[in-house]
Every structure is written in structure tokens, then in C-alpha cells.
Amino acid sequence: MIVILNNGGQYVHRIQRSLKYLDVPAKIIPNSTTLEEIIADSEIKGIILSGGPDITKATNCENIALNSELPVLGICLGHQLISKAYGGEVSRADSEEYASIKIYVKEENDLFNGVPSEFTAWASHMDEVKVIPDCFEVLAYSDICGIESIKHKEKSIYGVQFHPEVSHTEYGDVILKNFCKKCGFEFEE
């Protein structure tokens, strides 16, 4: 099972539904849930930190990003929380994104395996990661956001600023499937 920490974003249920379409069991839980509560459930194989409107209300997400041994994917605000937890900088975007944008994948990697080097994604945010922590690398960027996706250099921790769970994002299902594979789920190809 994948747990989705609910940070109050408008697409939280879309994340759960997208995983359901992949036949991956998922459950939405409050962002006040502790890492200890999560790892006490042996069925949980991965964690998604959802988007949301307010970084100050994302209760336990930074602690989970720092201390989880389970794979973690941050989407939108979740991406920002991961970066902030490890010492990155998050601030107001130069240009707010509420539209389809072109994403450029820097090089083939496990999160974007099977995804072309350019694809269209849905963005909906006012803040963005400005500087990544030293232990992360940039996986993808757009013309208006230089850090659209990151990956921890040693752990299975990923972040995407855009929304792979919405239908406007090409290959969003592939990106989510790739994360689920990191969590130990297998798929017929």
C-alpha cells in the first residue's frame, strides 16, 4: 500500500485514483500522522506527500522526508517540503504556474524511465524550489521553473513540482508507476 499524506491540495483524491487505476492500493491519511504510525503498518511500501496551499500546515511531512526508509514522492508542495527538509530553499515563483507546461527531462533516470525527454504536464503553484540541497540532483526543468523534479542521490526520495496525477500530464501514469516500482510493486509490461 502507498499512503498519501494529505496537505490539503485540490488533487489529493486524484493521486489515490491514479494509483487505483494502476492497481496499487492507496490510502489518504492526515499529514499529522507520524512516521512511527506509518511504519507500524507493514503493508505500507511507500509514501506520497501531496500538494497543498500552505507549507506551514504540512505538520509531519518534513520529518517523514528526512527519516523515512520507505520510498517517498513529493508532489507540488510535497516536492517543496522535501527540499526544505534537507536544507533547500523554497520561495515565491518568478512566474506562477497554472497551466500546461513543457517539462524537459535532463537525462534518463528511474523516475522518468519510459518518458520522453520532453512532455506536457499540468502545473498549479505559486511557490517553487529555488535551490536544491547538496544531497539532491535535478531530474527535470521547465522554461519557467528550473527545478521541476529532484531525486536524493542515495535514497529513494523524489519530488515533482508538476502534477503527474492529473489527466493533463502526459505520461503521469508512467511516472507514478515508476515510483510504485521503487516501492516494490510489480506490473505486467
Image (tube, rainbow, N blue to C red):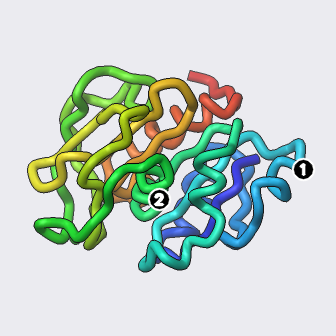
Q: Which amino acid, by three-letter code, is at mark 2?
A: Leu
10 Å neighbourhood of mark 2: few (<14), some, or many (≥20)? Answer: many
User: Percent from the top left, x then y, of residue 123?
Assistant: 28, 62
Q: Is residue 78 visible?
A: yes
Left or right of 102: which side holds 74?
Answer: right
The residues tagged by marks 1 and 2 sit, at their Cα atoms, a distance apart of: 23 Å
Q: Which amino acid, by three-letter code, is at mark 1?
A: Ala
Q: Which corner quadrant holds the C terminus?
A: top right
* Residue at figure coordinates x 38%, y 31% from the top left: 112
- Asked where in the image residue 46 lies, by quadrant, the reply is top right
* Residue at figure coordinates x 26%, y 73% from the top left: 126
- Asked which secondary structure carries label 1, the reply is loop
To which residue does mark 2 refer?
Answer: 81
Q: Give the foreground label among 1 and 2.
A: 2
User: Percent from the top left, x then y, of residue 97?
Assistant: 20, 67
Q: Are marks 1 and 2 in contact (CB under 8 Å)?
A: no
* Residue at figure coordinates x 22%, y 28% from the top left: 106
Q: Can residue 17 be seen in this view?
A: no
Most foreground residue, 95 or 174: 95
Left or right of 184: which side holds 82?
Answer: left
- Asked where in the image residue 45 lies, by quadrant, the reply is top right
- Asked which secondary structure carries label 2, the reply is helix
Q: Is residue 134 above or below residue 130?
A: above
Disc number placed over residue 4 in the picture, else none: none
Left or right of 130: which side holds 29?
Answer: right
To which residue does mark 1 refer?
Answer: 40
Q: How many labels does the image show?
A: 2
Most foreground residue, 126 or 11: 126
User: Percent from the top left, x then y, of residue 4?
Assistant: 64, 59
* Residue at figure coordinates x 46%, y 66% from the top left: 51
User: Percent from the top left, x then y, of residue 27?
Assistant: 73, 61
